Amino acid sequence: MIDWSKAYAARMERVLPSEIRELGKIKHPDMIHFGGGLPEPDLFPTEAIAKAYAKILSDPVLAKSGLQYTDTAGYMPLREYIARYMATLGVECGPENIILTAGSQQAIDFIARLFVSAGDTILVEAPTYLGGLRAFDAYEARYALLPSPFANATDVKTEDGSKPKLGYVMSDFKNPTGGSFTLPERNRVLDIAAEMDIPLIEDNAYEKLRYSGTPVRPLLSLDAERMGGIENSRVIYTSTFSKIVAPSLRLGWVAASSAIIRKLELVKQAADLAPATLNQMVLLEVLDEVFTPTHVEKVCAVYRGRRDAMLAALEKYMPSGVTWTKPEGGLFIWVTLPSHMDAPALVRRALTDFKVGSISGKSCYGTPPEMNTLRLSFSMVAEARIDEGIKRLSEAIRAS
Amino acid sequence: MIDWSKAYAARMERVLPSEIRELGKIKHPDMIHFGGGLPEPDLFPTEAIAKAYAKILSDPVLAKSGLQYTDTAGYMPLREYIARYMATLGVECGPENIILTAGSQQAIDFIARLFVSAGDTILVEAPTYLGGLRAFDAYEARYALLPSPFANATDVKTEDGSKPKLGYVMSDFKNPTGGSFTLPERNRVLDIAAEMDIPLIEDNAYEKLRYSGTPVRPLLSLDAERMGGIENSRVIYTSTFSKIVAPSLRLGWVAASSAIIRKLELVKQAADLAPATLNQMVLLEVLDEVFTPTHVEKVCAVYRGRRDAMLAALEKYMPSGVTWTKPEGGLFIWVTLPSHMDAPALVRRALTDFKVGSISGKSCYGTPPEMNTLRLSFSMVAEARIDEGIKRLSEAIRAS
């Protein structure tokens, strides 16, 4: 009988079951879940999606091409739509600058595959998106802290003194903190990437979920302007349709220099051949209805109410010494407990004894973690239940 | 401006645009294509698929769960269905032995990620599936020839004398040759894998496409019997719904020891989070109608006719010195030209001057290629056009 543990590649030592998945197995009928971060299914445009599948599958010509393999980079009319959408964000580009991926998670995985070899250093924020870290882990990356926007790029310390290979940031409503870069911060991040001469992933998965404040141009838009166009930009932009349309279509995209897109096409060809044709055709059908101010505001209104309810409840119940972020969008609020507190232990106790789910911030660091941090998501809990959930959490904190 | 060529990881040096994709750009209105290998879209069960989408999306509860993220390993009722299907192939297993992937291409990619580090040797057949090689290339694998079923395992020569990490074979109707292992060959392949103590990928993507001859049990079935069950087997079985249902659903699977499935779940979580929920629910709906002897025979009858037409035309037109395989199933026939002939040059000339597409066998080798080989697919050409296509190809050969 084979000894699997000896057969696995070294990278698998880094790939461990996540705390979130393990804790997700603890169930109570009355549990209030702030742990996840899934979009609210009541907001999915189910009717528009149903209509689009029916329309395409009842047309013999569309149905045949919809069920067949497609171009690896994606369905051309959808790539053209996304290029036009990027222009509304201040990024002039064409379909040759766009590739479709299975959500933005696959985009991050593919970009890592393009740039990262075992032992290479990636510059990340602290904290940062845990799914990004798990994708990078598969390529045996190491991490160093992205210099804060007002520090010097030469402050970067990699473990062995080598130059970093890649930077990874979220610009709007970051997972897990909910924070966004200001315009001066964006410019400084671009300065740093230029000084270090590294490619920079801009993960902008939550960009459309703004509930207050004023939009700021993406890093890709600013860098393309500096460099005379997207073709010369070092920024590789990723986003997804999972938050505004539906995660189950598994469609996200990369916008970048066409040189990068052509390479990512080869990566995708080897990894899973091509995106699902039919889902792309359906997405394109529904986007005209769904990527509109009216529908986006309908979605944002619900999440805005939940964010406000959570902020109000935190204010009402949290003991002194606990602080939290006040995000302008996205799905997350980041809580900092008094420095002596152990968030992983609190999270477990809150689940088992107080019937409220959260995740400890510990998994959200490529660099040494702050152990007194929590990520809360308001996305899946009805406004009326949020007060009760935060009350339970504050009781768990007081009992610790 | 960034110099991308210096930024890419070493693995990208191995990832090159394929001959097939490049040649695919040569178009003629009258071209006859034996190059591809896509399933015939007239055979897709479009009505059943349309009905299934409509059914699920018109049910508010099913629609919500269908559009949300799902379990990483896949939709449980579909995993259970596949486990029952594997039992019909002689593999006793449960849903814990099954994971859904984006086609069997992603299954191969993930298994490579699990086992292969840069420089590791994979044992392959010669020729073998070129998409498998491209997936392995991304992990900077090297290749050695799997000892022929009647040679000794100790005959294996890796470049540096190290032990191979993995074996990769197709058991039924291999891409590109159309050949299948006999029962004694299967047993010998298992002996070799056991002697070398390596995991063995059994890629069985074409298993249901049998047009003549008698089915032989998969390697996984034989090895599970030897080892006292799938949990102790070293065989990692991959297959796909792309050939009998539709490629666009992007759904394939792995059947293996639950230890492997749990690891692949972690790989998938980091790579693209989860398979598309809705597509899995739709697939499960249509399988009862489609994975039946009646529907499978309907599909096989069409391909059988095309295979027979291609074999008859080869017999009729090919000059002496040209030989070919006579497959019992699948989508491919493998042609060997006289040894002095250069197949890549012939393929190009046949496309441009004779308006017939094929691919040279050159890309189908991890080990040194035979330059006088061609892969022909009969899958996408109507029976009546096959004679003309093979006539053109034989003219191209005679003109070389």
Image (cartoon, coloured by chain):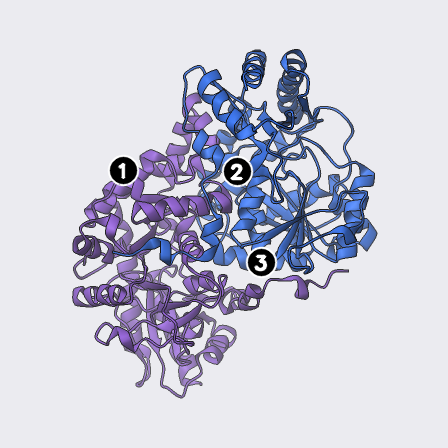
Chain colours: A purple, B blue
- From the viewer's perspective, tell me whether residue A397 is left or right of residue B132: left
Residue A330 is situated, as x and y percent measured from the top left of the image, at 30, 60
Q: Is mark 2 on a helix, strand or loop?
A: helix
**Between residues A58 and A365, which one lies in front from this camera angle?**
A365
**Between residues B144 and B90, which one lies in front from this camera angle?**
B144
As drawn, the label of residue A14 is none
According to the picture, the residue beneath numbered tag 3 turns out to be B119
Q: Residue A136 lies in what quarter of the image?
A: bottom left
The CA distance from mark 2 to mark 1 is 25 Å
Q: Looking at the image, which residue is at 41% across and 82% down?
A: A397
According to the picture, the residue beneath numbered tag 1 turns out to be A288
Q: Nearer the viewer, mark 3 or mark 1?
A: 3
Q: Residue reaching furthest front?
A: B340
Whether residue B320 is situated above or below residue A205 in the rendered picture: above
- From the viewer's perspective, tell me whether residue A147 is left or right of residue A213: right
Q: Which of marks 3 and 2 is in front?
A: 3
